[in-house]
Amino acid sequence: MSTDSTPSIDTPSAPRTLAEKVWDDHLVVKGEDGNPDLIYIDLHLVHEVTSPQAFDGLRVAGRPLRRVDLTIATEDHNTPTIGIDRPIADLTSRTQINTLRANAEEFGVRLHSLGDIEQGIVHVVGPQLGLTMPGITVVCGDSHTSTHGAFGAMAFGIGTSEVEHVMATQTLPLKPFKTMAINVEGTLREGVTAKDIILAVIAKIGTGGGQGYVLEYRGSAIRALSMDGRMTICNMSIEAGARAGMVAPDQTTFDYLQGRPHAPTGADWDEAVAYWTTLATDEGASFDAEVFIDADELEPFVTWGTNPGQGVSLSDVVPSPEQFDDPNERAAAERALQYMDLTAGTPLKEVPVDAVFMGSCTNSRIEDLRAFASIIDGKKKADGVRVMVVPGSARVRIEAEAEGLDKIITDFGAEWRFAGCSMCLGMNPDQLAPGERCASTSNRNFEGRQGKGGRTHLVSPLVAAATAIRGTLSSPSDLNGK
Amino acid sequence: MEKFTTVTGIAAPLRRSNVDTDQIIPAQFLKRVTKTGFEDALFYGWRQDPDFILNQQPYLGARVLVAGPDFGTGSSREHAVWALRDFGFSVVVSPRFGDIFRGNSGKQGLLTAQVPEEDVERIWRAIEQQPGVEMTVDLVERQLSIGELRLAFEIDDYTRWRLLEGLDDIALTLRNEEAITAFESRRAAWRPTTLPAR
Ligand code: SF4
């Protein structure tokens, strides 16, 4: 990892960050003369969109997939969330899915297909199976692979040719990332969640602020979060431009992992925990950059624009482009307001929505669904608002149903769907119509992301729930008496 | 990847500058699931015009493409290289290339030969005087010859070495096979494995 240029980096006693430790422990070959290091990959997650050409590349070159036992595939981006027993209507989607099935069969890769109990969004499935663990390296041909960093893993997204590279060699040539500490100290107020922390971080450092860095989230507010909350935060590291995000493993991490299908057992477990406990950043280790966030001050957050950095507190008004000194930011704000059809100065809580999407790899785990359900329990959704709830995996769906959450959700008037990426990117039929406005628990509010002409406000599950009740952007504290 | 030393073949003049990767291969072809078979997609828009140079004989069998400055700018799609390669090109000559395109080319055995703008003009004229004339591209000597012309071209040492050795990224990494295997033999038992499924 990048540290100062003193040769002390090789001395075991030199203080190191979490990221540096994981990096060092995966060095196959140290790059000399500015060449990249060769890094070993512990876990390769595969899905239908970025894998076909990688498999084809292996086939053309006559190369085997080196470690099928470190590879696992799921179907998520294209899968329908209703009528999952019927053939997929869209030809491109169907081709991608069928290609993955044929490739998995040919190369011997474990695949969880639509209808399988372990099927789901690749970033929900890995942790849920206990495959994602501290101190490992995880890659996937998907930028939100950063999610897995919540366990203290080094996890990052890669392109299709790198997918092929990992398949063939189980390694990647990489230049070390820089390190940035994101210190979040204090206690979150009621109704403020992990999603609000990360939206505040991105608003603070900007969508390019993390470029070239791995972010380490630290401080009392992070320690107090559950694993699901930590995953929400690490998931969106990429929206700040970072390669990866990490949280040092602690008892919360171990408790989450223990007993999961692929978690170590017996003596292996003890050995693992002993190692994992050494991973936290050493006292005195230095970061290339540091950021401080006061958790006490945070409020529920919402984006008003068309990139995840364009966010403010929900109690604020739509900002005016004149507030931005930087001419590029000002121009971006102008364009965003036009696209979003918002007027500067409008209180965000007066903005009406047409749809609410509760799902995506950012917020579709069981705790997210519980949080959402706790707000809507016994209530009815606002008239004319379409509410879609999409669990992150088939298992999450089953777990939620065992707790009766599906009943709460359908009684509320919302749609309870099968697992997948769904309206996070609208690659399947779950899309916004042109001009429709949506409060979404996903991670990208880009133009057209949820459907051509659709307008996205990124929010937490609690805000999504309150918004579904009132029909305008709202937080649970606005619900008194309703 | 095959070792690249010398290529001799028909040179096609593409009298255009700023040929971006969207022109080389439009986005509609990115949905495909293969890494080969993109020959029909190359310059798809332009090839709708029967007069386009690559629709003319003898250029249907060309191996060297000679283009104006800033070839391969724009989106990072690797498909641009696949399409050129599948059409039959082994070499693109231009005064300047898009960075990512040049990187992608070097990794996939397509030689990007950089020559000054006035030399491109001389090559174009040589071809137009004698359509179907063959060009020899000698990577060892970094030299192009076509008719009477002998021209030096530029390519960085690292990419040249890789092409000469026929090393794609994966082959390059696999030169560390011993180190990878040694690393794997030390891998702790607690680290995850996906098989057998539990
Ligand atoms: S849920 Fe959205 S962000 Fe996550 S993997 Fe799927 S498409 Fe990507």
Image: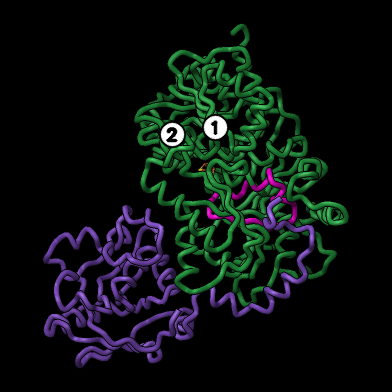
- Residue A267 sits in quarter: bottom right
Chain coloured green in the rendered structure:
A
Relative depth, front residue between B135 and A283: B135
Queried on whether the Cβ of the residue with tag 1 lies below 8 angstroms from ligand 1, the answer reads: no
Badge number at residue A390: 1
Say left or right for B192 vs A74. Answer: right
CB atoms of marks 2 and 1 within 8 Å: yes
Residue A279, horizontal then vertical, whole percent? 79, 54
Say left or right for A115 vs A280. Answer: left
Relative depth, front residue between A196 and A326: A196
- Residue A260 sits in quarter: top right
Q: Is B70 placed above or below A396 here?
A: below
Relative depth, front residue between A121 and A334: A121
Residue picked out by circle 2: A430
Quarter of the image that includes the N terminus of chain A? bottom right
Kindly give the residue lying farthest to the top in the view shown: A481
Q: CA distance from mark 2 to mark 1?
A: 10 Å
Q: Is A73 placed above or below B57 here?
A: above
What's the residue at 54%, 44% (across, down)?
A239
Q: Chain of mark 1?
A: A
